[in-house]
Image: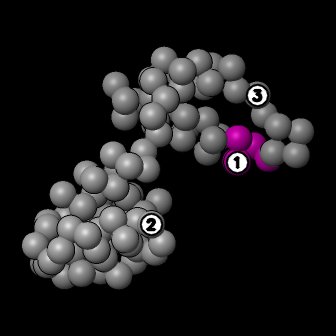
Amino acid sequence: MWKFEVSTLLREVIHPKPSIVEALKLSLRGDAADVVRRFGTYRNVDDIVGTLDGIYSNVEASEIVLSQYYNANQGDRENVAAWGCRLEDLLDRANTKK
């Protein structure tokens, strides 16, 4: 969700990039904030997002994620909307991995 929000801010071109970098840094907590703090003050948004993506992104191969998609079943207590969102997430993860 965080990565989506940052991408949206960058795409809209409403705010200057230095403001986005500042907001990005302030939004982070815990280990992610420590990683970015170690960068110092002269990193751009792409560097920060790329590094965090490398650390926190899913490392499963696209074939595994696609297999999970094809084998997914709706849970007993899962409503249709939640199941649909879960399927879309799996497909998006597979697509991101190409």
Q: Which secondary structure is most common in the magenta stretch?
A: helix
Q: Secondary structure at mark 1?
A: helix
- State the residue at coordinates (15%, 77%): 41
What residue type is disc 2 on? Answer: Asp
Tag 3–tag 1 contact (CB < 8 Å): no
Mark number displayed over residue 31? 2
Q: Position of residue 22 (x, y in %)?
A: 24, 81
Report the span colored magenta: 79-83
Task: Tell me how far mark 3 sits from mark 2, CA to CA.
Answer: 34 Å
The correct choice, above or below, for 44 with respect to 62 in the image is: below
Residue 28, quarter of picture: bottom left
Question: Is residue 68 at all visible to an observer of this figure?
Answer: yes
Task: Tell me how far mark 3 sits from mark 1, CA to CA.
Answer: 12 Å
Q: Does residue 80 belong to the magenta stretch?
A: yes
- Mark 3 vs 1, N-terminal side: 3
Residue 32, quarter of picture: bottom left
Question: Is residue 17 at all visible to an observer of this figure?
Answer: no
Q: Which residue is mark 3?
A: 73
- State the residue at coordinates (45%, 23%): 62
Q: Does residue 20 belong to the magenta stretch?
A: no
What residue type is disc 3 on? Answer: Asn
- Mark 3 vs 2, N-terminal side: 2
Q: Which residue is mark 1?
A: 82
